[in-house]
């Protein structure tokens, strides 16, 4: 098998080189990565852990090899294969050969753009959007090395899209009077295929009509619907979740500064056609904000109002990237009783196993430890309140961001008393080399996020007080040309109590579990990186991850990791 | 521009509107899941003595701090009759706990002191109170037989001459209603029939037909049947013979007979209730076409025959019966 693969690759490479040299209708794209790591775990339990292994060494090499074919100037075809070889495998053992992506895109009559196959799709934050809600906004650069691996493997792009399989089209019309542009876009994807028995074909379809009246005003109507295709199974019970929204942008210049109003409002319906036990949910949301940009100081002030109903459901916008039911890559079980190791900060930053590639069809479990306030981003249902944001950047590129959310529940969860939420975020990035006019890169960064959840009830058992404070800092110092020294530290303290909800197949809450926390997580990391070019680097990385549960709900542990990462992207 | 801002404000106002979410919660109440059980209002009855014959009832009440599964068990201290009332909720009140003197487990309550005991699921304590039944419940309806005065002379009794025959009224603590019941027992190895009693309509007011409603949907026939443990299966067959021309005689060739067969395959007393419109004509246990007008006319019943049967190959069969009564509009609630 492996011989056939190698021969095929060689033939393909030869074809690519020969054909590419003639008229460049075929290009070779792809990347390669090799990761080698050595991990150790030490467990602090009441009894010494004599059952689970304490060391894990491993790694892999992958090569993504794609052909980008341009049969004509209006068409592109991409096919990419991935060869992965787990270290320790030899001549076929541990080797996998997969199709990583396959798509076709083009332009019809210089007007209508289309793409078929594997595509990254995004609409609005309430229709189809990957919020990456649990990610640290101000992640120190050293941790980006691992997060970039997750992002690359799961097709997370910078524009909050989800990787899906289907088709999308878009086209626009320009006008000389009244309105400037009229833009249309549409998508259809298959979320799951029927098994001809009890699972129907489930599709997602969406579209937008965007009217640009001028550079000062535009408005759009968006719709996204997830639905079962009738007749693909014998059962007549059909699921449907439809979200319809309007979003708008209004801008005005005042004394050289820019004021803008924006937002989105809409409704959702979520129902099963013939299941009398299933709830029929419908609700609405509003997210409206005003921005004021002071040109002279390069400061942007934002103030917003958020109101997302308790029964608002949007599969496209309320899917999480992190799956907290997933298993970590290594040391899945620990302690003498072989408990499942809890998902830690270490896993959330760089464990690709717990990340989803695409949207999910049920409301996923949230983590009260990592994000109790907006687990589905601003599309989190049952939230009402306001937020404010300040973004500032000096001419020396010192960047300061600060953000504040003050939210309440709209409907009580197991109590008529409502939870109150607060989030404080701050981030500072200082490019020291710009300040001291040094030619090589030197920068430091600091960030903090504080989340508070509170509920005061007449019944003391219902009271909640949960506080999570995360601080992080990091630096990047280019000691020699293309040779970086990197360091970073993240600490997160979670203290207090909450109730975690058990849900049935219809996402209805059936029970509340008491969760008490006094948890400290820390990651300390250091590394050196040599940059061969913009997209190629070799990095030696060491990190220590401490998980300390002072209440003893889970045994405390420390994982130390030494890794070598070689990454190249063509 | 002002118009655009106005439109936007209007749009938001329309969407935001007035929510009613504060009136409901998602999921079960946390307070109810985790708080320890306690009474908010003690368990009590609205009266200590009750005259059910006069239409009085007993209303139980209590209130708890959480939703619970509760059960009130009322037991006659003399008769050992039992009434069970159960429910789920935070309160016991007139809406879910009214006792009208009826019985869940026979016998029927007598004039006696009863103990009402409240038990709560997952709560070890029980809570009790006494209630004196001054007069037991009287059931409205046409009583065909309660055997309190024995076998009436107006009835016709026939008993086969088999072995261990006992087709007599008994007086003992087993009686589900009153003090007496009829025992039907014996071995007849040549025939299904062990014995029978005919109840002619003339025994109930003198008229050739029973004084019942005309609408068979509103007429229920009820009786209490006792299955004797460890004996062969008895079959009790009721034959409702309609004297359609009211000549005082049932003619099996041109008048309707409707039958109801009870296979006594349980142990202890059981209330049997059947709507007259649901009764069919049987021949040797199989459905058949009635010979008369084909209409169920409870007001034309001229005679009821009660047959005690058993498979002759089985040997000795025994059962007991009491309180044959027609009720109107609903089954008997003893």
Image: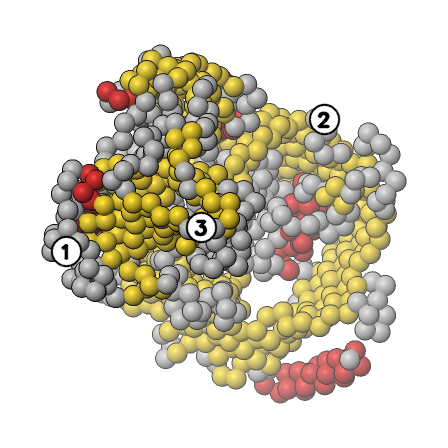
Picture residue at 76% right of the left edge, 50% below the top:
A330
| Mark 3 vs mark 1, CA separation in Å | 34 Å
Do callouts 3 and 1 mark residues in contact (Cβ within 8 Å)?
A: no
**Residues at marks 3 and 1, common chain?**
yes
Q: Is residue B315 above or below residue A547?
A: below
Chain bearing mark 3: B
**Residues at marks 1 and 2, common chain?**
no
Crowd band around label 2 with a 10 angstrom C-alpha radius: few (<14), some (14–19), many (20+): some
**Residues at marks 3 and 2, common chain?**
no
Q: Residue furthest front?
A: B161
- x, y percentage for residue B62? 40, 18
Name the colouring of the figure.
secondary structure
Marks 3, 1: nearer the viewer: 3
- x, y percentage for residue A354? 64, 51
Q: Which SS class for mark 1?
A: loop
Res B291 seen here: yes
Marks 1, 2: nearer the viewer: 1
Residue that carries the numbered disc 1 in the rendered image: B244
Picture residue at 46% right of the left edge, 33% below the top:
B28
Picture residue at 30% right of the left edge, 25% below the top:
B137
Q: In this rendered view, identify the residue nearer to me: A186 or A568.
A: A186
Residue that carries the numbered disc 2 in the rendered image: A550
Q: Which SS class for mark 3?
A: loop
| Mark 3 vs mark 2, CA separation in Å | 88 Å
Q: In this rendered view, identify the residue nearer to me: A446 or B157.
A: B157
Chain bearing mark 1: B
- x, y percentage for residue B202? 18, 42
Q: In this rendered view, identify the residue nearer to me: A417 or A452.
A: A417
Residue that carries the numbered disc 3 in the rendered image: B161
Which of the 4 image quarters holds residue A16? bottom right
Marks 3, 2: nearer the viewer: 3
Chain bearing mark 2: A
């Amino acid at each position: 098998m492996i011989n056939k693969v190698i021969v095929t690759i060689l033939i393909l490479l030869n074809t690519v080189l020969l054909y590419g040299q003639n008229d460049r209708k075929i290009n070779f794209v792809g990347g390669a990565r090799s990761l080698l790591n050595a991990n150790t775990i030490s467990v602090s339990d009441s009894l010494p852990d004599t059952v689970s292994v304490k060391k894990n060494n491993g790694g892999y090499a992958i090569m993504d090899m794609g052909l980008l074919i341009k049969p004509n100037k209006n068409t592109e075809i991409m096919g990419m294969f991935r060869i992965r070889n787990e270290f320790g495998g030899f001549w076929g053992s541990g080797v996998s050969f997969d199709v990583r992506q396959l798509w076709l895109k083009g332009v019809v009559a210089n007007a209508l753009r289309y793409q078929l196959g594997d595509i990254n799709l995004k609409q609005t934050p309430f229709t189809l959007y990957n919020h990456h809600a649990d990610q640290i906004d101000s992640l120190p650069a050293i941790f980006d090395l691992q997060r970039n691996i997750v992002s690359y493997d799961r097709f997370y792009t910078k524009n909050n899209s989800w990787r899906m399989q289907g088709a999308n089209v878009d086209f626009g019309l320009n006008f000389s009077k009244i309105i400037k542009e009229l833009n249309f876009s549409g998508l259809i994807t298959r979320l799951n295929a029927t098994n001809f028995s009890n699972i129907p074909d489930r599709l997602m379809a969406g579209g937008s009509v965007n009217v640009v009246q001028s550079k000062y005003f535009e408005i759009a109507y968006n719709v996204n619907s997830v639905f079962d295709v009738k007749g693909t199974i014998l059962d007549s019970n059909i699921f449907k979740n439809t979200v319809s929204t309007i979003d708008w942008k209004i801008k005005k210049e005042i004394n050289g500064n820019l004021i803008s109003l924006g937002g989105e409002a809409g409704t959702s319906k979520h129902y099963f056609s013939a299941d009398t036990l299933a709830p029929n949910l419908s609700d609405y949301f509003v997210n409206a904000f005003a921005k004021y940009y002071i040109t002279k100081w390069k400061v942007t002030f934002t103030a917003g109002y958020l109101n997302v109903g308790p029964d608002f459901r949007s599969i496209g916008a309320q899917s999480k990237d992190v799956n907290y039911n997933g298993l970590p890559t290594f040391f899945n079980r620990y302690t003498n009783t072989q408990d499942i190791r809890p998902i830690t900060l270490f896993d959330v930053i760089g464990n690709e196993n717990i990340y989803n590639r695409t949207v999910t069809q049920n409301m996923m479990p949230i983590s009260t430890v990592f994000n109790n306030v907006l687990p589905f981003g601003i599309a989190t249902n049952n939230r009402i309140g306001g937020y404010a944001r300040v973004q500032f950047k000096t001419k020396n590129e010192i960047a300061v961001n600060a953000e504040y959310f003050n939210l309440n529940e709209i409907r009580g969860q197991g109590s008529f008393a409502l939870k109150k939420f607060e989030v404080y975020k701050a981030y500072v990035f200082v490019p020291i080399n710009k300040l001291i006019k040094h030619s090589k890169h030197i920068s430091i960064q600091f960030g903090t996020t504080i989340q508070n959840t509170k509920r005061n009830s007449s019944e003391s058992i219902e009271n909640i007080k949960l506080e999570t404070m995360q601080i992080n800092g990091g630096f990047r110092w280019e000691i020699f040309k293309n040779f970086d020294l990197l360091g970073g530290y993240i600490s997160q303290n979670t203290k207090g109590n909450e109730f975690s909800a058990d849900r049935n197949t219809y996402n209805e809450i059936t029970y509340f579990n008491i969760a008490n926390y006094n948890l400290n997580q820390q990651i300390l990391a250091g590394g050196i990186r040599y940059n061969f070019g913009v997209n190629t680097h070799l990095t030696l990385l060491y990190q220590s991850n401490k998980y300390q549960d002072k209440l003893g709900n889970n045994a405390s542990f420390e994982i130390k990791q030494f890794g070598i990462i070689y990454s190249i992207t063509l | 521009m002002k118009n655009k801002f106005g439109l936007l404000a209007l749009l938001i106002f329309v969407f935001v509107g007035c929510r009613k979410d504060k009136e409901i919660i998602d999921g079960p109440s946390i307070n109810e899941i985790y708080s320890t059980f306690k009474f908010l209002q003690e368990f009590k009855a609205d009266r200590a003595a009750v005259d059910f014959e006069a239409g009085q009832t007993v209303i139980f009440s209590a209130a708890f701090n959480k939703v619970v599964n509760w059960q009130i068990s009322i037991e006659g201290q003399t008769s050992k009759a039992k009434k069970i009332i159960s429910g789920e909720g935070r309160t016991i009140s007139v809406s879910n706990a009214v006792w009208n003197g009826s019985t869940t487990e026979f016998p029927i309550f007598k004039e006696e002191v009863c103990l009402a005991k409240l038990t709560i699921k997952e709560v070890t304590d029980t809570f009790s109170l006494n209630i004196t039944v001054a007069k037991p419940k009287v059931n409205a309806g046409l009583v065909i037989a309660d055997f309190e005065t024995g076998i009436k002379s107006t009835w016709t009794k026939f008993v086969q001459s088999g072995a261990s025959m006992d087709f007599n009224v008994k007086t003992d603590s087993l009686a589900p209603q009153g003090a007496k019941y009829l025992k039907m027992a014996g071995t007849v190895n040549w025939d299904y029939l062990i014995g029978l009693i005919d109840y002619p309509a003339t025994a109930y007011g003198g008229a050739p037909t029973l004084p019942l409603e005309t609408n068979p949907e509103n007429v229920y026939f009820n009786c209490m049947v006792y299955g004797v443990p460890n004996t062969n299966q008895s079959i009790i067959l009721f034959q409702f013979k309609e004297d359609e021309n009211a000549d005082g005689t049932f003619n099996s060739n041109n008048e309707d007979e409707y039958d109801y067969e009870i296979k006594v395959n349980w142990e202890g007393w059981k209330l049997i209730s059947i709507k007259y419109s649901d009764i069919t004509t049987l021949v040797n246990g199989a459905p058949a076409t009635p010979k008369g007008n084909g209409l169920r006319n409870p007001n034309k019943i001229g005679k009821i025959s009660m047959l005690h049967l058993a498979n002759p190959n089985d040997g000795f069969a025994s059962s007991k019966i009491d309180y044959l009564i027609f009720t109107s509009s609903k089954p008997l609630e003893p």
